[in-house]
Image (cartoon, rainbow, N blue to C red):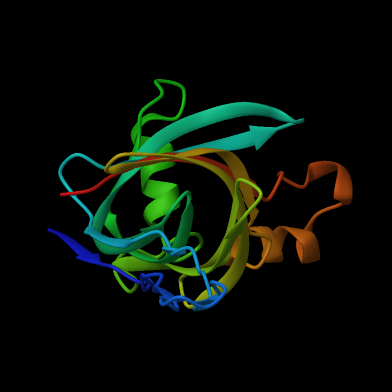
Amino acid sequence: MKKIIIYGASIFTMMFAMASCGGAEEESTDETSEDSTATEQAEVVEYDVDTAASIINWYSMEEGEKAHHGSVKVLNGSYSVQGDEITSASLTINMNSFVVEDEAGGEKLQSHLSSPDFFDLNQYGTSSFTFIDHSDGMITGKLNVVGLEMDVEAPVTLSEGKVEVGDFTVNMVQLPFYANEREEKPEADWHDPKIGFNATIVAQ
């Protein structure tokens, strides 16, 4: 559902002219009220997210390159736009829709990522994104995964009823898997804790 709130005020100009008449030398006095041009702020448009049409893609990183990949769906969400800027946004992510889509990862990786060692899907069925700011083409916010809060900064492109989120990474070193291997293994054996994402968020 799309809701529109219109801000701004329009100011009209009044002009009042007085001219004397009669046989005497003509005298005229013009009194003009303050002339203002209406400055209308852009309307704020609020959208609910179309969860069926929206998708979040993820990929793991190995030696700076994309490795395994998959997707996860949005459970619910909304966002507001004023002009060419997002002014608010929130997403709840359905972690039980989390899938591995590359053949190299397969069911083994799917099981690993679903386990308490990683995303713990039995206990944490949802993750969430909370908006902070949008400026200079970048959106910032907080991602909450397995009860842990992580910083997000991502490039976004707006169009009518759609937000395209370009590639960005989130450092998930707080997750048990990465934290444990840093205690138990030499640095040469550590996995890259940055998980990459991009997304298409479609409005209803």
Residue 9 x, y percent position in the rendering: 36, 74
Hey, which residue is sitting farthest right in the picture?
187
Q: How many marks?
A: 0
Residue 68 x, y percent position in the rendering: 51, 30
Left or right, 6 with respect to 189, comes to left
Q: Is residue 97 above or below residue 9?
A: above
Left or right, 203 with respect to 10, comes to left
Q: Is residue 116 above or below residue 157?
A: below
Q: Which of these two is toward me, 160 or 15?
A: 15
Q: Residue at x 37, y 30 (%)?
A: 106
Q: Residue at x 50, y 69 (%)?
A: 36
* Residue 92 in sight from this viewpoint: no
Hey, which residue is sitting farthest front in the picture?
23
Q: Is residue 128 above or below residue 63?
A: below
Hey, which residue is sitting farthest top in the picture?
103
Residue 53 x, y percent position in the rendering: 19, 39
Q: Which of these two is toward me, 12 or 3?
A: 12
Q: Residue at x 80, y 55 (%)?
A: 185
Q: Is residue 70 above or below residue 28?
A: above
* Residue 95 in sight from this viewpoint: yes
Residue 171 x, y percent position in the rendering: 67, 56
Q: Quadrant of the N terminus?
A: bottom left
Q: Residue at x 57, y 74 (%)?
A: 25
Q: Which of these two is toward me, 112 or 158?
A: 158
